[in-house]
Amino acid sequence: MSSRLIVISNRVSVPKAAGAAGAQGGLAVALNAALLEHGGIWFGWSGQETEEFTGHLDMQRNDGITTATIDLEPQDIDEYYNGYANRTLWPLFHYRIDLTEYDRNFGEGYERVNERFADAVLPLIEGEDLVWVHDYHLLPLGSMLRQKGVKNRMGLFLHTPWPPTRLLVSLPLHERLVASMLEFDVIGFQTSEWLESFLHYVQKEMGLKVNPDNSIDYQGRRVVARAFPIGIDFDEFVEGAAGPEARDAHDRLKQSVRGRKILIGVDRLDYSKGLGERMEAFGRFLADNPEQAGSAVLLQIAPPSRGDVASYQMIREDLERKTGHLNGAYADVAFVPIRYVNRGYPREQLAGFYRAADIGLVTPLRDGMNLVAKEYIAAQDPENPGVLILSQFAGAAHQLKDALLVNPHSIEHVSEAIKRALEMPLDERRERHRKLLASVRDHDVRRWRQDFVSALFGDEAPPLLDDASPEDSSEPQDQTA
Ligand code: GDG
């Protein structure tokens, strides 16, 4: 394949150059691998602020990958990043219209920055290049590039959910936003559920016809809309989990709990992750099972994120209050039930913590996919694996059906699942883990990337990887009964 890839995302993350814990997730690794294979450039915001926008491109080459970044001015960061992206689209796409802020300045800033991205990346795009745009920050970018004459194949992958039409129509100028997305040749979602919501919107609100293969004919062009469930870098993660740094972290955590059971949560500090509800569910478990109250510890790792947005400061305060309350009620001189850690750890250490944990507690209220669920499975000892408790509202629930699927809004349901997981016989743990592991291994980040890039080349679609939405089934499988 001779085409180069031009990857465009809000931020750019090159593995070895990234350095900081958490900066080089599976996504960065996958995109870097794609760039190494095809050649090309990764373009985005540097994360730096400049007094006045110049559009200057900072080109760098690290580990064989070329990156091109621009700085943004303070107003851009306020209105585009902290504004429209993280105070309008993020909450709306996670079904939180109560937190969604509609401010005309945000919308204008969002369009302005997308235009700035388009102008800056334009000279980098050559004849046969494939353009792959990522996420909700850059939905109108394809249309802006088309207006500037770009004829290349262009694709968009949305990492978040796509909201139901009834919620999306609360967004001023929603038609314009979606129409701009249809300038891409391929639009990718994490699961069939978000894909269906998108197709529902284009039919009901735009009167467009969706073909049997889910493509949409729009203004004389054919747009392919499909689910491409993202995965983790399985081999890298398993290798990391078996290494010395992971073993050290594992042993350190195990020794510190002195034979108690460990529940682990690892999430960016974000209201979509259901952290407050999770704490309450653990509190309910402690209240309902006093005989086990001194024998289980919840380790919640929650590195801060988007601290400039007020709703993120509020969730932080809420969690500190809930943790303090529960620890006050259940702690003893030599024991606290919740270890709430507001920082990130290197990936290898994280893998060791996952492996030490008897339960992976992954209970977002809404999540595009959720990679933590997959990392937890990959890090387990197959001979003596822990149990994954997974929200039915995470995209990952479409694939990881052998987890204990729960409704994260139901404190009772999650509390019962914790009890059930702690008591689960070894045979059942192994059997569930075997199936989960096969799914995580087979649907890894390489497959995701290859499927997307093939679709971008215009290749035929392979069969859909996930089944119908778990919410479509009459009831979530009540596995806590
Ligand atoms: C968005 C979508 C979708 C977390 N703490 C540390 C750390 N992490 C890593 C995890 C995992 C990643 O961050 C988080 O990924 P998630 O998928 O769980 O969630 P989002 O950040 O919300 O990601 C999501 C994803 O995009 C990909 O498409 O799955 O639905 O919301 O890899 O391990 N990494 C390190 N230290 C930490 O303390 N090193």
Image (cartoon, rainbow, N blue to C red):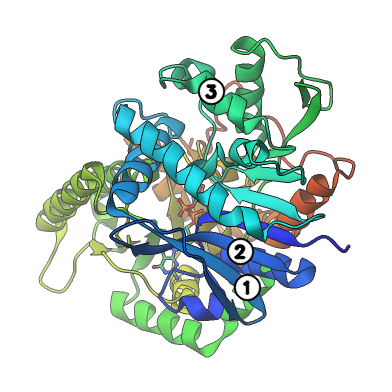
First reached walking from the N terminus: tag 1 or tag 3 = 1
Neighbour tally class for label 2: few under 14, some 14-19, many 20 plus, Cα within 10 Å? many
Q: Is residue 4 left or right of residue 469?
A: right
Location of residue 434 in the rendering, given as x and y in whole percent from the top left corner: 69, 59
Location of residue 144 in the rendering, given as x and y in whole percent from the top left corner: 59, 38
Marks 2 and 1 sit apart, C-alpha to C-alpha, by 6 Å
In the image, 468 versus 337, the foreground residue is 468
In this rendering, is residue 392 above or below 116? above
Q: Is residue 25 visible?
A: yes
The amino acid type, in three-letter code, at marker 3 is Arg
Q: Is residue 30 visible?
A: no
Neighbour tally class for label 3: few under 14, some 14-19, many 20 plus, Cα within 10 Å? few
State the SS at label 3.
Answer: helix
Location of residue 357 in the rendering, given as x and y in whole percent from the top left corner: 44, 67
| Residue position marked by numbered label 1 in the rendering | 66
Q: Which mark is residue 42?
A: 2
Location of residue 306 in the rendering, given as x and y in whole percent from the top left corner: 31, 53
In the image, 195 versus 46, the foreground residue is 46
Query: Quarter holding the N terminus?
Result: bottom right
Residue at (34% x, 82% y) in the render: 255
The amino acid type, in three-letter code, at marker 1 is Thr
Tell me the quarter of the picture where residue 61 sits: bottom right
Which residue extends farthest bottom? Answer: 244
Residue at (59% x, 81% y) in the render: 62
First reached walking from the N terminus: tag 2 or tag 3 = 2
Marks 2 and 3 sit apart, C-alpha to C-alpha, by 27 Å
Residue at (64% x, 75% y) in the render: 65
The amino acid type, in three-letter code, at marker 2 is Trp
Q: Is residue 200 left or right of residue 84?
A: right
Marks 2/1 in contact by CB < 8 Å: the verdict is yes
Q: Is residue 276 left or right of residue 367?
A: left
Marks 2/3 in contact by CB < 8 Å: the verdict is no
